[in-house]
Amino acid sequence: MTALIGPIARADSALAQVHPLAKLGAATAVMLALLPTVDPVTPAILLAVTLGLLPTTGIRLGALLRRAWPILLGAVSVALANALYGDGGGRVVIDVGPLELTAGDVSSGATLGLRLIAIALPGVLAFATTDPTDLADALVQQLRLPARFAVGALAALRLVPLLGADWDAIRRARRSRGMAAGRNPARATGIFASQVFTLLVAAIRRASRLATAMDARAFGAAAHPTTARDLPVKPGDWSFLLVALALTLAATAISVTLGTWQLVLT
């Protein structure tokens, strides 16, 4: 669980020095450019640019794969589903007839899988190179969001890694009491569901205690709370965002020029 939340980049890396909102803005621009289209060119270009940023993060490829494996699994699943059951236009059609796998179906499925990775990976890199405290400060200082919301989100992010430790403790406690599934899949399912419920109860209790403690310390009580440190948007941050917008527009323009750009559901 710890591998999925929190920064994993070096604090002195180039991308880690960029303002959190600039990185989120760049990831949002990529998402908005890829959502309306199902062409292969735009996501391929933007994914190549995103992977090109990897050396500026100090993140090892193995660490990135450990964080992004759910996205890769989802992309492969989407690609296979659309290759086997798609109509070639990004829509899944359930047909009881025999499967006929064509080159067009494989290409359509691969395009959708590539599109999913290209949408999600910029967000993964943005959060992997951003300290949650910096993000909370940026939400309050630049976006003027309520401090109660920002601090609550920060506390939630800080508590997420504890879920992994709780899950491991619950699993070990049950095994020490002889509650092992062995090779029985039905028993394994029941034990898993019971552990999930126990973890949910523990998480709710911890969240309630934290909320009570924060209210007792008057978190979010002030209408205009002060911040311990300033997190200004520097010219380099604006440049990063503008370059990201320019590359996004350029990728779309290249796709339109090549005649591959296609709206979803057309």
Image: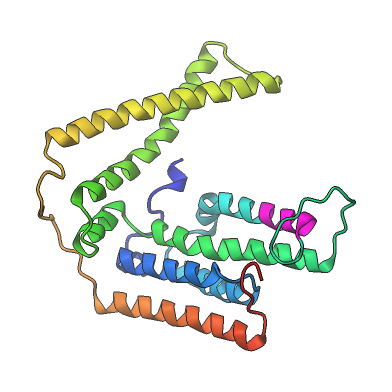
User: In the drawing, does residue 111 fall left or right of residue 54?
Assistant: right
**How many marks do you count on the picture?**
0
The way the protein has been coloured in the rendering is: rainbow
**Residue at the location (12% across, 55% down)?**
228
> Picture coordinates of residue 146 (x, y %)?
20, 52
* Magenta part, dominant SS: helix
User: In the drawing, does residue 103 fall left or right of residue 72?
Assistant: right
Residue lying at the far bottom in this picture: please name it. 257
The correct choice, above or below, for 191 with respect to 113 in the image is above
The correct choice, above or below, for 107 with respect to 201 in the image is below
> Picture coordinates of residue 172 (x, y %)?
49, 21
**Residue at the location (68% across, 20% down)?**
186
Q: Quadrant of the C terminus?
A: bottom right
> Picture coordinates of residue 65 (x, y %)?
55, 54
User: In the drawing, does residue 88 fall left or right of residue 98?
Assistant: left
> Picture coordinates of residue 24 (x, y %)?
38, 64
Figure quadrant of residue 109: bottom right
- The one of 167 and 32 positioned closer to us in this rendering: 32
**Residue at the location (21% across, 58% down)?**
140
Verify whether residue 261 appears in magenta: no
- The one of 142 and 23 positioned closer to us in this rendering: 142
Residue lying at the far top in this picture: please name it. 177
- The one of 96 and 245 positioned closer to us in this rendering: 96
The correct choice, above or below, for 242 with respect to 220 in the image is below
**Residue at the location (76% across, 66% down)?**
88
The correct choice, above or below, for 50 with respect to 62 in the image is below
Residue lying at the far front in this picture: please name it. 266
Verify whether residue 77 appears in magenta: yes
The magenta-colored residue range is 76-86
- The one of 152 and 237 positioned closer to us in this rendering: 152
